[in-house]
Each structure stands twice: as structure tokens, then as C-alpha cells.
Image (cartoon, rainbow, N blue to C red):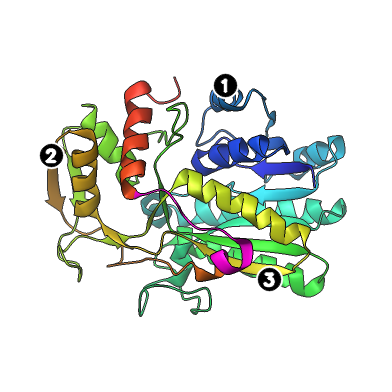
């Protein structure tokens, strides 16, 4: 297996995964609409790896253009990241999320089938577990109705993939349920670069640290958690990227359809993360407590024993590493990829 198509490959997780793939000797082809990312990411990937990935600016819903890409290359496997991902925005614009995320996945699967490509790793999310009855969460836990349309699109795409597998058992499908990716590449050359006001905690913290925003807004301090703020399983984006490489081994061994949680197995509250950032980087983060956000839950963290047992993957980087790397990225790139 040599050539991997990465959809959404200039995004936060896609770009870090592309680096890991290139460094492991894969040829990487990226498809991205650039609706949520910047073309400059390709320069940074090249700077880190010495190789510039092949790139096509294509909306995955455009079947004719996707077919053109597949015609030009002998693709062995697809890693599918492409999709809109802001929970809050998905509550405001559910139709946009269903059309974009589910529509693009349907086109991708149709084109893969046309070209006889059987191997796909899908970027799913812990949101498919809905409001958990217990933590940690296991892959065997039931899928519930998601608490927001973004999560619901992930459930629908998982169902699409499972239906494809039932129709064609020669497919090799890995569904990765991510918990909360944070951090940045240790070089400071790549990181999370939100277009507008950050929806995710870490880029908001780093923007406060660099003086772009006056304070952090913490949404709710009345959750059923030790300090009242929401608890999540924050995983370093480089650990997450390495989980995709580990998944390609399952595909190579033709193991059918597999689902893995990718997290650290440990919950960290919003306030704990803020304190860790302050301690590691020596910067005070002022914050204001506001009301809860729609669709947020008390706590969420993973059991990742299955990934360790079956694909020999385990998160190795700490919350402190995440805080250090995220701050280096922000400090070295105060305006992101500009």
C-alpha cells in the first residue's frame, strides 16, 4: 500500500496526518475545498517533511471533479476527514451540515466503488455516543441520537459505511471515534487555525494568551464534575495522526470493518486545562463564566484498550505537551497561516 488519498488534508487533523504518512513513506494526495483551511498548509507540510503532497482544490460533493482525481492516480486507500465540524454552527445550520458532510461521503463512496478501491479510514467522533450513561466510553456502547447535528452526521456516515460493508465484505473499513484533539506540531509550523472566533477550547486559550481576545469564555460551571466545568478527553493531534497510520495496518491485513476510540482514557476539565496551560507556559489566562452551550454534556472520555490490543496504538503525549505545542504554534504564527 503506497498511495493514500486524504480528504480534508489541509485541515487541522488532516495536515498532521499527512505529515505522519509522508514520513512513513506513503505518497499523499490531498483533496480539500479550502472552505475551512489554507493553501499555505502545503508549504508547511513540505517544510517539515521535504515533500509537497499532490493537491486538488475540490469540493467532494462535485462527483465529476472527484472522478478526475481518481482517474489520475492509483489510489490504495482513502482517509476521509473532509467535513464541517463546528458543533455550535451545526445547531444553527443543520441543513448545511447534512448536505456537506453526508453528501460528500456518499459521493466519495460511490467514486471509490467505481474505481474498485476497498480501503477507507473514516474520521468519526465521540459525539456518536450522545449523552453518556457512564464513562469511560467503549466501542461497544450504543450509538444514541447525537446532541447536535454535527454528531448526527457522523452517525449517518458510520451507518453508510456499515451498509457498504454489508453489501461488500471485501471492503476494509476503519472507523476512528476521536475524542478532543488539541496541541500542534512540535516544530511550531502547523496547528489549529480557526477562520473566526474559535469554537474549540485550546485555540481560544492561545488567542487570549497572545492578546487577540480579552478573556476566555467558559460555558457553564454547574456540570456534575469535580470543578463544575465540562470534562473531556483531550488528545494531542500528533498522537491522533499516528492512530491513522496504525489503522492502515488493519486495512493491509484485510480485517473487515473495525471501530476504535482514539483518546487518552483520561478526562480533563476546562479549568484543569487552563491551569495546565498557565503552569507550562507561565501566562495567566483570564476567564469569564457564562451560560452553558446547547448540545454540551457533563463529561466524556474514552476507553482505548481495543486500539492498543488490535492496532498497537496508545496516546503518548500529555496535556502539558499539548499546552506547550499549542502555545509555540500560536506564538510563532500569531495570525495563523498568513
Eye-nearest disc, 2 or 1: 1
Magenta stretch containing residue 314, yes or no?
A: yes
Q: Position of residue 240 (x, y in %)?
A: 51, 50
Residue at disc 2, secondary structure: loop
Marks 3 and 2, Cα distance to the nearest angstrom? 45 Å
The C terminus sits in image quarter: top left
Residue at disc 3, secondary structure: helix
Q: Position of residue 250 (x, y in %)?
A: 70, 61
- Against 242, residue 148 (above or below) is below
Marks 1 and 3, Cα distance to the nearest angstrom? 38 Å
Magenta span of residues: 307-318
Task: Bin the neighbour count of mark 2 within 10 Å (Cα to Cα): few under 14, some 14-19, many 20 and up.
Answer: some
Residue topped by disc 2: 286
Eye-nearest disc, 3 or 2: 2
Q: Quadrant of residue 324?
A: top left
- Sequence order check, earlier mark of 1 and 3: 1
Residue topped by disc 1: 47
Left or right, 122 with respect to 179, comes to right
Task: Bin the neighbour count of mark 3 within 10 Å (Cα to Cα): few under 14, some 14-19, many 20 and up.
Answer: some
Residue at disc 1, secondary structure: helix
Kindly check if marks 2 and 1 are in contact, taking CB atoms under 8 A apart as contact: no
What residue is shown at x 84% (from left), y 37% (from top)? 73
Amino acid at each position: 500500500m503506497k498511495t493514500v488519498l486524504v480528504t480534508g488534508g489541509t485541515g487541522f487533523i488532516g495536515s498532521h496526518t499527512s505529515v505522519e504518512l509522508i514520513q512513513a513513506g506513503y505518497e499523499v494526495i490531498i483533496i480539500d475545498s479550502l472552505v475551512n483551511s489554507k493553501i499555505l498548509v502545503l508549504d508547511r507540510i513540505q517544510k517539515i517533511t521535504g515533500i509537497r503532497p499532490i493537491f486538488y482544490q475540490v469540493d467532494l460533493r462535485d462527483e465529476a471533479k472527484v472522478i478526475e482525481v481518481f482517474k489520475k492516480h492509483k489510489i490504495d486507500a482513502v482517509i476521509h476527514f473532509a467535513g464541517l465540524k463546528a458543533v455550535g454552527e451545526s445547531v444553527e445550520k443543520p441543513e448545511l451540515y447534512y448536505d456537506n458532510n453526508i453528501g460528500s461521503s456518499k459521493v466519495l463512496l460511490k467514486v471509490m466503488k467505481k474505481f474498485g478501491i476497498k480501503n477507507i479510514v473514516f474520521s468519526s467522533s465521540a459525539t456518536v455516543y450522545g449523552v453518556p450513561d457512564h464513562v469511560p466510553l467503549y466501542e461497544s456502547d450504543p450509538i444514541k441520537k447525537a446532541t447536535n447535528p454535527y454528531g448526527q452526521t457522523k452517525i449517518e456516515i458510520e451507518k453508510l459505511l456499515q451498509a457498504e460493508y454489508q453489501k461488500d465484505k471485501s471492503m476494509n473499513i476503519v472507523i476512528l471515534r476521536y475524542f478532543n484533539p488539541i496541541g500542534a506540531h512540535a516544530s511550531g509550523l502547523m496547528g489549529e487555525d480557526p477562520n473566526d472566533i474559535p469554537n474549540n477550547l485550546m485555540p481560544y486559550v492561545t488567542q487570549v494568551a497572545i492578546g487577540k481576545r480579552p478573556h476566555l469564555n467558559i460555558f457553564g460551571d454547574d456540570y456534575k464534575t469535580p470543578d463544575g466545568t465540562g470534562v473531556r478527553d483531550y488528545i494531542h493531534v500528533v498522537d491522533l495522526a499516528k492512530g491513522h497510520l496504525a489503522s492502515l495496518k488493519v486495512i493491509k491485513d484485510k480485517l473487515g470493518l473495525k471501530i476504535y476510540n482514539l483518546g487518552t482514557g483520561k478526562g480533563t476539565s476546562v479549568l484543569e486545562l487552563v491551569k495546565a496551560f498557565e503552569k507550562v507556559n507561565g501566562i495567566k489566562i483570564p476567564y469569564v463564566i457564562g451560560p452553558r452551550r446547547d448540545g454540551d454534556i457533563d463529561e466524556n472520555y474514552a476507553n482505548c484498550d481495543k486500539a492498543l490490543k488490535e492496532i498497537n496504538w496508545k496516546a503518548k503525549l500529555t496535556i502539558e505537551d499539548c499546552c506547550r505545542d499549542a502555545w509555540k504554534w500560536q506564538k510563532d504564527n500569531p495570525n495563523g497561516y498568513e
